[in-house]
Image (tube, rainbow, N blue to C red):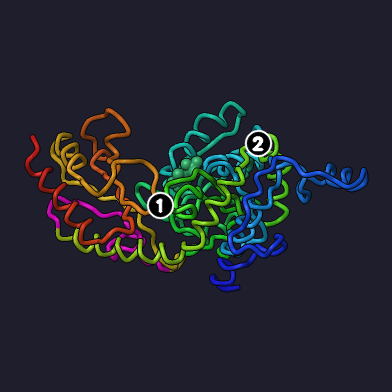
Amino acid sequence: MNITEILHSYGEEGFSYNPVSVPIYETSIFSFKSFEEFQNSLLNEFEAHLYSRGKNPTAEVVEKKIAALEKAEDAKLFASGIAAVSAATMAFLKSGDHVICVKDAYGWTNKLFSQYLKRFEVEVTFVEGTNLEDFTRNTKPNTKLFFLESPTTFTFQLQDLSAITKFAKENRIKTVIDNTWATPLYQNPIELGVDIVVHSASKYIGGHSDVVAGVVVGKSEDIRHIFNTEFMNIGATIGPFESWLLLRGLRTIHVRMKKHMENTLKVIEYLQTVPQVDEIYYPFYAKHPQYELAKKQMKGGSGLFSIKLKAQSLQQIVAFTNAFRIFRRAVSWGGYESLVIPYAATNRDGLTEKNKIVRLHIGLEDPELLIEDLQRAFEAMKKAKL
Ligand SMILES: *Cc1c(COP(=O)(O)O)cnc(C)c1O
């Protein structure tokens, strides 16, 4: 199936009146004609329309499309990306198990492994993840799961997915990857051997900064298992309207992603000439240490990357951040608008090395205006107190 077929009418069959826009099934319950039908549904909630905490027709359309985009058998939407991360991992872990997780994964993913799962005696080793040895050397007899995020979304380090999944399969270790950055258009980890893919759909899948959602993608058997355990028990269910917003976002994902990448490359071309920029962390920047791997396992890059400023004082970072007029100072990413978040705003540690990193999301605005806005920020940085 090509992308047009998937984004067009695929998964939208069977609605009354042949609507072009999928109806929002704003109903919590579904009714049955007979005892027999009712009983069949109660005994197979994974397949039945019984209660919208489990299954809802609007959500199912999105699930089918995302599964197809990821070249996977099935998908399940969640109320948030972190709910998807938590359910996809906890469904395969029990006390006494060991996990290897990339060190620079999304903050709440890190907290899930470093704090929350500790209460259930799940042991974790954090690794940089840029070398296969980070995984082979730290694997123990009780290692059950590798949690990957490639690239990581602050420092943009990659993991070699084919090499890691080959080792994981030989050792019967489950692999889960957070694929939010690349989107299903630019990286299909399941084709590279990964078992389960998760996304924060709040980013590019929604694409308009108006919805919080997540999705888990994988083999039918794994999705069914996650459904019957963490999904139904914890109940982080997405609503029909939020599902519809995702569908509306998905229709244009290919157009948006192309423009995000084009704009980003233009902005990076400019940033390369700026003396206050120490480093640029973007997998499709030719000087990225893993550029070759990026080209090998991804078809393109999105609009999120970081730079390291040659800052001599925290004041310079503050002035840089405050000078923007188009870039918005905000968390998250993936919508129309460009965003800036300095790492220094996430703590009160002063001018550490890591606090010189500033993350930018390049939106869909005119790139010339974004470059002017950055020039304004670099000017402000120059004038700030040292
Ligand atoms: C935002 C984000 C998450 C969490 O998703 P929510 O939808 O905010 O719960 C997980 N992983 C990555 C890489 C993210 O950027």
Label 2 Cα neighbours within 10 Å, binned few <14 / some 14-19 / many ≥20: some
Q: Tell me which corner region of the image, top left, top right, bottom left or bottom right, holds residue 88.
A: top right
Residue 321 visible: yes
**Could you say which disc has been placed on residue 235 in the image?**
2
- Residue 135: x %, y % from top left: 51, 49
- Residue 70: x %, y % from top left: 57, 62
- Residue 144: x %, y % from top left: 62, 44
**Could you say which disc has been placed on residue 334 in the image?**
1
Answer whether residue 277 is magenta in the image.
yes
Please name the residue shown 59% across and 33% down the image. Answer: 122
Q: Nearer the viewer, residue 118 or 251?
A: 251
Q: Amino acid at mark 1?
A: Gly
> Against 181, is 100 above or below?
above
Q: Residue furthest top?
A: 119
Q: CA distance from mark 2 to mark 1?
A: 26 Å
Answer whether residue 104 is magenta in the image.
no
Which contiguous range is marked in magenta?
274-295
Please name the residue shown 42% across and 54% down the image. Answer: 151
Report helix, strand or loop for mark 1.
Answer: loop
